[in-house]
Amino acid sequence: MDPIADIIETLSSLGEQRYGKENVSQLAHALQCATLAEEDGATSALITASLLHDMGHLVDKRFEVGQKSEIDRHHENIGAAYLSAWFPPDVTDPIRLHVPAKRYLCATEDGYFDDLSDASVRSLKLQGGAFDKAEADAFISQPHAKDAVRLRRWDDLAKVPDLATLSLEHFRTHIDQVFVSTRA
Ligand SMILES: [Fe+2]
C-alpha cells in the first residue's frame, strides 16, 4: 500500500478516538494543529510534523495500557521512530521534541504553565516536569528544537471542540512534498 495513504487512513480511522482526556478527537486535534501551522506560515515539513505529531498514540499497541495506568508511553519517540521510514529529520525531530518543548516552555516562559490544559498539566508530571536551566539550554541547542517549540504552541491551542479546519486531503499536498522513502 502507498505509505502516505496508509498514514492518512490511520489518522482518519483511529483518529476518531478521543485525544486523551481532552474534548476533541485525535483527528480534530491533528487538523487544528496543522491548520494553525499553515496559518502561521510554517514550511511543509513543519506543517506535516504538526499534522502527524501524535501518531505515536495511534500506532502504539499499548496505548490503552498507558492511559489506564497513567504510564508515560513516550508517544513522541514512538511516532518519530515510526515516521522516520518516510520522513526526514525536519519532520521527525519536531515530533520527537514536542514533549520536551513543553518542559522547556514551562522553564523559560512566565505564564506558560498556567495556560496548560488540565490533561497537559497531568501529563507534564509523568513527563518529568519543567526543565532546569541547564536542561533548557541543552534542549534548545538541538537541531529543530525551535521548530518543536513552535509546534508545541499550536499543539496547546489545538483543543477547541467543533472548530473548522483545513481538510486532511488539503494536507496531503504538504506530506507529498516532504515524503522521502528511506527504505531501500
Ligand atoms: Fe498534541
Image: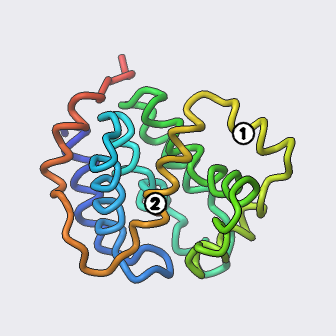
Residue at 23% over, 62% down: 12
Residue drawn where x is 36% and y is 16% of the image? 184
**Which x, y percent locates residue 21?**
50, 81
Residue 174 vs 32, above or below: the answer is: above
Q: Is residue 27 above or below residue 6?
A: below
Q: Name the foreground residue: 55 vs 95.
A: 95
Determine whether the residue tagged by mark 1 lies in a helix, strand or loop.
Answer: helix
Residue at the spot of label 2: 155
Q: Earlier in the sequence, mark 1 or mark 2?
A: 1
Which residue matches tag 1?
139
Establish whether ligand 1 lies closer than 8 Å to the Cβ of label 2: yes
Q: Residues within 10 Å of mark 2 (few under 14, many from 20)?
A: many
Name the secondary structure under disc 2. Answer: helix
State the residue at coordinates (56%, 43%): 96
Which quadrant of the view contains residue 65? Answer: bottom right
**Looking at the image, residue 79 lies above or below residue 58:** above
What amino acid type should be assigned to the residue bearing mark 2? Asp
Q: As shown in the figure, which amino acid type bears the numbered disc 1? A: Phe
Q: Is mark 1 within 8 Å of ligand 1?
A: no
Q: Position of residue 161 (x, y in %)?
A: 31, 81
Q: How has the structure been colored for display?
A: rainbow
Given contact means CB atoms under 8 Å apart, are the residues at marks 1 and 2 in contact? no
Residue at x 73%, y 53% (from the top left corner): 108
**Which one is nearer the viewer's eye here, 73 or 104?**
104
Disc 1: CA contacts within 10 A as few (<14), some (14-19) or many (>=20): some
Q: Is 43 or 81 nearer to us in this picture?
A: 43
User: Along the line of sight, which residue is nearer the eye, 65 or 166?
Assistant: 166
